[in-house]
Protein backbone atom coordinates (compact mmCIF):
# COMPACT_ATOMS: atom_id res chain seq x y z
CA UNK A 1 0.00 0.00 0.00
CA UNK A 2 1.38 3.37 -0.99
CA UNK A 3 0.30 6.98 -1.34
CA UNK A 4 0.60 8.56 -4.79
CA UNK A 5 0.68 12.27 -4.23
CA UNK A 6 -0.07 14.24 -7.42
CA UNK A 7 0.88 17.69 -6.26
CA UNK A 8 2.69 20.97 -6.60
CA UNK A 9 6.39 21.57 -6.20
CA UNK A 10 7.35 25.18 -5.43
CA UNK A 11 10.31 27.35 -4.66
CA UNK A 12 9.25 29.44 -1.63
CA UNK A 13 10.55 33.02 -1.25
CA UNK A 14 9.87 33.82 2.39
CA UNK A 15 9.93 37.37 3.77
CA UNK A 16 9.77 38.13 7.50
CA UNK A 17 7.74 41.35 7.84
CA UNK A 18 6.30 43.39 10.72
CA UNK A 19 2.85 43.40 9.09
CA UNK A 20 1.35 42.19 5.80
CA UNK A 21 2.07 44.69 3.03
CA UNK A 22 -0.81 47.17 2.55
CA UNK A 23 -2.21 48.48 -0.77
CA UNK A 24 0.20 51.07 -2.18
CA UNK A 25 2.83 50.36 0.49
CA UNK A 26 6.47 49.40 -0.13
CA UNK A 27 7.67 47.36 2.80
CA UNK A 28 11.23 46.35 3.72
CA UNK A 29 11.50 42.78 5.05
CA UNK A 30 13.49 41.94 8.18
CA UNK A 31 14.72 38.68 6.72
CA UNK A 32 14.54 36.78 3.43
CA UNK A 33 15.04 33.05 2.87
CA UNK A 34 14.55 30.60 0.07
CA UNK A 35 12.97 27.26 0.93
CA UNK A 36 11.54 24.27 -0.90
CA UNK A 37 7.76 24.08 -0.70
CA UNK A 38 4.49 23.62 -2.50
CA UNK A 39 1.55 21.96 -0.79
CA UNK A 40 2.18 18.76 -2.74
CA UNK A 41 5.90 18.72 -1.98
CA UNK A 42 5.35 19.44 1.71
CA UNK A 43 2.71 16.72 2.04
CA UNK A 44 5.03 14.17 0.39
CA UNK A 45 7.77 15.04 2.88
CA UNK A 46 5.32 14.83 5.79
CA UNK A 47 4.08 11.42 4.58
CA UNK A 48 7.63 10.11 4.20
CA UNK A 49 8.71 11.42 7.61
CA UNK A 50 5.62 9.83 9.13
CA UNK A 51 6.71 6.48 7.69
CA UNK A 52 4.45 6.11 4.63
CA UNK A 53 5.57 4.75 1.28
CA UNK A 54 5.09 7.75 -0.99
CA UNK A 55 5.42 8.40 -4.71
CA UNK A 56 5.31 12.02 -5.86
CA UNK A 57 3.65 12.74 -9.19
CA UNK A 58 4.55 16.24 -10.35
CA UNK A 59 6.04 18.66 -12.87
CA UNK A 60 9.09 20.90 -12.47
CA UNK A 61 11.10 23.12 -14.80
CA UNK A 62 14.79 22.72 -15.55
CA UNK A 63 15.42 24.98 -12.52
CA UNK A 64 13.81 22.42 -10.18
CA UNK A 65 16.25 19.50 -10.14
CA UNK A 66 17.31 20.35 -6.58
CA UNK A 67 13.71 19.91 -5.41
CA UNK A 68 13.51 16.45 -6.98
CA UNK A 69 16.83 15.58 -5.33
CA UNK A 70 15.49 16.76 -1.99
CA UNK A 71 12.44 14.50 -2.26
CA UNK A 72 14.73 11.58 -3.13
CA UNK A 73 16.84 12.23 -0.05
CA UNK A 74 13.66 12.09 2.02
CA UNK A 75 12.86 8.63 0.65
CA UNK A 76 10.11 9.75 -1.75
CA UNK A 77 9.91 7.91 -5.10
CA UNK A 78 10.36 10.62 -7.75
CA UNK A 79 10.14 8.57 -10.95
CA UNK A 80 6.80 10.23 -11.82
CA UNK A 81 8.16 13.79 -11.65
CA UNK A 82 8.56 15.17 -15.17
CA UNK A 83 10.71 18.07 -16.27
CA UNK A 84 8.58 20.29 -18.53
CA UNK A 85 9.08 23.42 -20.57
CA UNK A 86 8.05 25.95 -17.90
CA UNK A 87 9.70 27.38 -14.80
CA UNK A 88 9.18 25.52 -11.53
CA UNK A 89 6.23 26.91 -9.54
CA UNK A 90 7.01 29.46 -6.87
CA UNK A 91 5.45 31.16 -3.86
CA UNK A 92 5.96 34.60 -2.32
CA UNK A 93 5.30 34.23 1.40
CA UNK A 94 5.06 37.00 4.01
CA UNK A 95 5.38 35.89 7.63
CA UNK A 96 4.43 38.30 10.45
CA UNK A 97 5.79 38.11 14.04
CA UNK A 98 2.94 35.96 15.40
CA UNK A 99 3.71 33.33 12.73
CA UNK A 100 0.71 33.98 10.45
CA UNK A 101 1.45 34.05 6.74
CA UNK A 102 0.02 35.25 3.45
CA UNK A 103 0.97 33.47 0.24
CA UNK A 104 0.91 34.25 -3.47
CA UNK A 105 1.62 31.35 -5.82
CA UNK A 106 2.56 31.14 -9.48
CA UNK A 107 1.80 27.69 -10.85
CA UNK A 108 4.44 27.51 -13.62
CA UNK A 109 5.26 23.84 -14.25
CA UNK A 110 2.57 22.73 -11.76
CA UNK A 111 -0.07 23.47 -14.41
CA UNK A 112 1.60 21.37 -17.11
CA UNK A 113 -0.06 18.00 -16.49
CA UNK A 114 -1.43 16.59 -19.72
CA UNK A 115 -5.02 15.31 -19.39
CA UNK A 116 -4.15 12.40 -21.70
CA UNK A 117 -1.35 11.22 -19.41
CA UNK A 118 -3.46 11.07 -16.24
CA UNK A 119 -5.26 7.70 -16.75
CA UNK A 120 -1.96 6.14 -17.90
CA UNK A 121 -0.13 7.46 -14.86
CA UNK A 122 -2.75 6.00 -12.53
CA UNK A 123 -2.52 2.62 -14.22
CA UNK A 124 0.87 2.21 -12.56
CA UNK A 125 -0.86 2.12 -9.16
CA UNK A 126 -2.83 -0.70 -7.55
CA UNK A 127 -6.41 -0.42 -6.21
CA UNK A 128 -4.91 -0.67 -2.69
CA UNK A 129 -2.98 2.56 -3.22
CA UNK A 130 -4.31 5.96 -2.24
CA UNK A 131 -4.18 9.03 -4.46
CA UNK A 132 -3.62 12.32 -2.64
CA UNK A 133 -4.39 15.66 -4.28
CA UNK A 134 -4.28 19.31 -3.38
CA UNK A 135 -5.59 22.13 -5.59
CA UNK A 136 -2.26 23.53 -6.79
CA UNK A 137 -1.99 21.59 -10.07
CA UNK A 138 -4.15 21.40 -13.18
CA UNK A 139 -6.24 18.31 -13.94
CA UNK A 140 -7.49 17.67 -10.37
CA UNK A 141 -10.98 16.58 -11.48
CA UNK A 142 -9.45 14.28 -14.13
CA UNK A 143 -7.25 12.70 -11.47
CA UNK A 144 -10.23 12.11 -9.16
CA UNK A 145 -12.33 10.51 -11.90
CA UNK A 146 -9.51 8.32 -13.24
CA UNK A 147 -8.60 7.06 -9.75
CA UNK A 148 -12.24 6.35 -8.89
CA UNK A 149 -12.55 4.42 -12.15
CA UNK A 150 -9.57 2.26 -11.08
CA UNK A 151 -11.08 1.69 -7.63
CA UNK A 152 -8.34 3.72 -5.93
CA UNK A 153 -9.14 5.78 -2.85
CA UNK A 154 -8.74 9.53 -3.20
CA UNK A 155 -7.89 12.00 -0.44
CA UNK A 156 -8.27 15.66 -1.36
CA UNK A 157 -7.11 18.88 0.27
CA UNK A 158 -8.89 21.74 -1.56
CA UNK A 159 -6.09 24.22 -1.00
CA UNK A 160 -5.97 26.81 -2.32
CA UNK A 161 -9.76 26.90 -2.59
CA UNK A 162 -11.17 28.08 -5.94
CA UNK A 163 -14.67 28.25 -7.43
CA UNK A 164 -13.74 25.31 -9.69
CA UNK A 165 -13.59 22.98 -6.66
CA UNK A 166 -17.40 23.13 -6.33
CA UNK A 167 -17.72 21.35 -9.68
CA UNK A 168 -15.15 18.61 -8.90
CA UNK A 169 -16.55 15.08 -8.42
CA UNK A 170 -16.23 15.34 -4.63
CA UNK A 171 -18.70 12.47 -4.11
CA UNK A 172 -15.89 10.13 -5.23
CA UNK A 173 -13.62 11.14 -2.34
CA UNK A 174 -12.62 8.81 0.45
CA UNK A 175 -11.27 11.67 2.53
CA UNK A 176 -11.61 15.46 2.40
CA UNK A 177 -9.26 17.51 4.59
CA UNK A 178 -9.77 21.25 4.68
CA UNK A 179 -9.45 24.31 6.90
CA UNK A 180 -12.17 26.69 8.08
CA UNK A 181 -11.68 29.18 5.23
CA UNK A 182 -11.91 26.42 2.64
CA UNK A 183 -14.95 24.86 4.33
CA UNK A 184 -16.75 28.22 4.37
CA UNK A 185 -15.97 28.85 0.70
CA UNK A 186 -17.10 25.36 -0.29
CA UNK A 187 -20.36 25.35 1.68
CA UNK A 188 -21.22 29.05 1.98
CA UNK A 189 -21.46 28.50 5.77
CA UNK A 190 -19.19 30.55 8.02
CA UNK A 191 -20.07 28.66 11.23
CA UNK A 192 -17.90 25.54 11.63
CA UNK A 193 -20.83 23.48 12.91
CA UNK A 194 -23.07 24.25 9.95
CA UNK A 195 -20.23 23.91 7.44
CA UNK A 196 -19.36 20.44 8.80
CA UNK A 197 -23.01 19.34 8.82
CA UNK A 198 -23.42 20.57 5.28
CA UNK A 199 -20.29 18.71 4.08
CA UNK A 200 -21.32 15.50 5.86
CA UNK A 201 -24.81 15.70 4.37
CA UNK A 202 -23.45 16.29 0.87
CA UNK A 203 -20.68 13.64 1.15
CA UNK A 204 -22.01 11.00 3.59
CA UNK A 205 -19.44 8.35 2.58
CA UNK A 206 -16.42 10.66 2.87
CA UNK A 207 -14.26 11.04 5.95
CA UNK A 208 -14.23 14.80 6.53
CA UNK A 209 -11.50 16.46 8.58
CA UNK A 210 -11.69 20.15 9.44
CA UNK A 211 -8.45 21.70 10.68
CA UNK A 212 -8.95 24.71 12.94
CA UNK A 213 -5.45 25.90 13.85
CA UNK A 214 -5.31 26.82 17.55
CA UNK A 215 -8.82 25.35 17.98
CA UNK A 216 -7.63 21.87 16.96
CA UNK A 217 -9.29 19.55 14.45
CA UNK A 218 -12.68 17.93 13.98
CA UNK A 219 -13.42 14.69 12.12
CA UNK A 220 -16.67 13.15 10.96
CA UNK A 221 -16.54 9.72 9.33
CA UNK A 222 -19.88 7.94 9.07
CA UNK A 223 -21.18 7.66 12.65
CA UNK A 224 -17.84 8.61 14.18
CA UNK A 225 -17.20 12.15 15.32
CA UNK A 226 -13.92 13.12 17.00
CA UNK A 227 -12.68 16.48 18.24
CA UNK A 228 -8.94 16.88 18.75
CA UNK A 229 -7.68 19.87 20.75
CA UNK A 230 -4.53 21.62 19.49
CA UNK A 231 -1.22 21.35 21.37
CA UNK A 232 -0.30 24.75 22.84
CA UNK A 233 2.99 26.07 21.45
CA UNK A 234 4.64 29.40 20.60
CA UNK A 235 4.25 29.74 16.81
CA UNK A 236 6.92 31.46 14.73
CA UNK A 237 5.75 30.41 11.25
CA UNK A 238 2.52 28.58 10.45
CA UNK A 239 3.53 27.79 6.84
CA UNK A 240 2.99 24.08 6.03
CA UNK A 241 1.18 23.32 9.31
CA UNK A 242 -1.80 22.05 7.33
CA UNK A 243 0.47 20.04 5.02
CA UNK A 244 2.19 18.46 8.02
CA UNK A 245 -1.18 17.57 9.58
CA UNK A 246 -2.36 15.93 6.35
CA UNK A 247 0.82 13.89 5.80
CA UNK A 248 0.90 12.53 9.36
CA UNK A 249 -2.86 11.91 9.47
CA UNK A 250 -2.92 9.96 6.20
CA UNK A 251 0.23 8.00 7.04
CA UNK A 252 -1.34 6.79 10.29
CA UNK A 253 -4.64 6.02 8.57
CA UNK A 254 -2.80 4.05 5.84
CA UNK A 255 -1.05 2.05 8.57
CA UNK A 256 -4.49 1.07 9.85
CA UNK A 257 -4.23 3.21 12.97
CA UNK A 258 -7.30 4.37 14.89
CA UNK A 259 -8.72 7.69 13.71
CA UNK A 260 -8.37 9.36 17.12
CA UNK A 261 -4.67 8.37 17.20
CA UNK A 262 -4.17 9.62 13.64
CA UNK A 263 -5.69 12.96 14.68
CA UNK A 264 -3.52 13.18 17.79
CA UNK A 265 -0.30 12.43 15.88
CA UNK A 266 -1.23 14.85 13.09
CA UNK A 267 -2.02 17.65 15.56
CA UNK A 268 1.20 17.08 17.46
CA UNK A 269 3.22 17.10 14.21
CA UNK A 270 1.55 20.36 13.09
CA UNK A 271 2.23 21.94 16.49
CA UNK A 272 5.95 21.18 16.12
CA UNK A 273 5.96 22.49 12.53
CA UNK A 274 4.72 25.95 13.56
CA UNK A 275 7.62 26.40 16.01
CA UNK A 276 10.09 26.34 13.06
CA UNK A 277 10.60 28.56 10.02
CA UNK A 278 9.97 27.46 6.44
CA UNK A 279 7.66 24.95 4.81
CA UNK A 280 9.08 21.46 4.14
CA UNK A 281 12.06 22.27 6.38
CA UNK A 282 9.81 22.73 9.40
CA UNK A 283 8.14 19.29 9.21
CA UNK A 284 9.13 17.07 12.15
CA UNK A 285 10.49 13.53 12.06
CA UNK A 286 8.18 10.79 13.41
CA UNK A 287 10.45 10.19 16.43
CA UNK A 288 9.78 13.76 17.62
CA UNK A 289 6.03 13.18 18.00
CA UNK A 290 6.00 11.29 21.32
O1 LIG B 1 1.10 25.16 2.42
C1 LIG B 1 2.28 25.91 2.31
C2 LIG B 1 2.70 26.00 0.87
O2 LIG B 1 1.74 26.76 0.15
C3 LIG B 1 4.01 26.72 0.64
O3 LIG B 1 5.11 25.86 0.71
C4 LIG B 1 3.81 27.38 -0.72
O4 LIG B 1 4.63 26.88 -1.72
C5 LIG B 1 2.33 27.19 -1.05
O5 LIG B 1 2.15 26.18 -1.95
Image: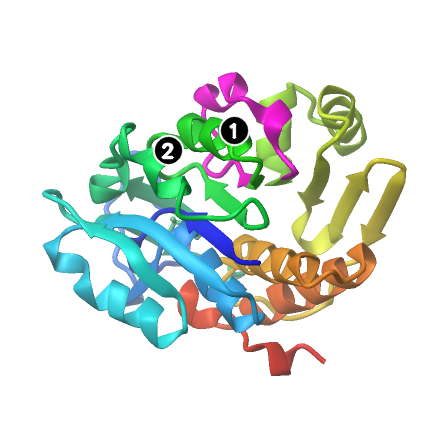
CA distance for labels 2 and 1: 9 Å
| 120 sits left or right of 174 in the view | left
Q: Return the x and y of residue 53 as percentages of the image width and height.
A: 51, 65
Binning the other alpha carbons within 10 Å of mark 1 as few (below 14), some (14 to 19) or many (20 upward) gives: some
Height in image: 234 above or below 241?
below
Mark number for residue 186? none
Mark number for residue 149? 1
SS for tag 1?
helix
Q: Return the x and y of residue 39 as percentages of the image width and height.
A: 43, 50
Answer yes or no: is residue 101 visible: no
Q: Magenta span covers which residues? A: 156-175
Name the residue rendered at 58%, 66% in the picture: 235
Height in image: 234 above or below 217?
below
Q: Would residue 59 be counted in the magenta stretch?
A: no
Nearer to me, 48 or 196: 48
| 277 sits left or right of 35 in the view | right
Question: Quarter holding the N terminus?
Answer: bottom right
Kindly tell me whether mark 1's CB lies below 8 Å from ligand 1.
no
Which residue is disc 2 drawn over?
119
SS for tag 2?
helix
Badge count = 2
Question: Who comes first in sequence, dot 2 or dot 1?
Answer: 2
Nearer to me, 152 or 101: 152
The answer to whether the residue labelled 2 contacts the one labelled 1, judged by CB atoms less than 8 Å apart, is yes
Name the residue rendered at 26%, 64% in the picture: 67
Amino acid sequence: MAVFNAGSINIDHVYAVDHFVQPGETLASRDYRLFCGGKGFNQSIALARAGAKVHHVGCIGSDGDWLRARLQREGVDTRWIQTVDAPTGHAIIQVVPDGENSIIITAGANNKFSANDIPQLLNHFTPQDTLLLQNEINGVADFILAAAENGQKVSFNPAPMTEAVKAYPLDKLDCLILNAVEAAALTGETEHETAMQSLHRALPKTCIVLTLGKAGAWLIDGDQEIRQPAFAVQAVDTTAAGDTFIGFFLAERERGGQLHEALRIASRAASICVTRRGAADSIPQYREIG
